[in-house]
């Protein structure tokens, strides 16, 4: 029985796909969070300037 039989290969492919999706999704969520933070900061800044 070799190390890379069809079942082992299938499990490895599933794990790699899951990890790739997880890392990509985490990176996208981080960018969205930063954009939201910057947007809310700009909004607060403009509201303060308007209220003067």
Image (tube, helix red, strand yellow):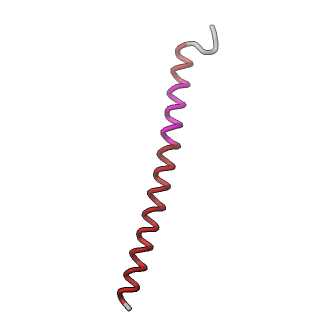
Residue at 38% in and 92% down: 52
Measuring from the top left, give residue 29's x and y in whole percent.
46, 52
Q: Is residue 11 above or below residue 17?
A: above
Q: Is residue 32 above or below residue 20?
A: below
Measuring from the top left, give residue 4's x and y in whole percent.
60, 15
| Closer to us: 48 or 26 | 48
Quarter of the rendering occupied by the N terminus: top right
Q: Is residue 39 above or below residue 33?
A: below
Q: Is residue 19 above or below residue 39?
A: above
Residue at 44% in and 73% down: 41
Residue at 55% in and 25% down: 12
| Closer to us: 18 or 39 | 39
Main secondary structure type of the part rendered in magenta: helix
| Closer to us: 27 or 22 | 27
Q: How many marks?
A: 0
Q: Residue furthest bottom?
A: 52
* Residue 18 is a magenta residue: yes
Residue 27 horizontal side relative to residue 40, left or right = right
* Residue 13 is a magenta residue: yes
**Range of magenta residues:** 12-22
Measuring from the top left, give residue 43's x and y in whole percent.
39, 75
Residue at 41% in and 68% down: 39
């Amino acid at each position: 029985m070799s190390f890379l039989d069809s079942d082992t290969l299938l499990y490895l492919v599933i794990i790699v796909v899951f990890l790739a999706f997880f890392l990509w999704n985490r990176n996208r969520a981080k960018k969205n969070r930063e954009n939201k933070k910057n947007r809310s900061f700009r909004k607060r800044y403009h509201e303060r300037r308007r209220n003067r």
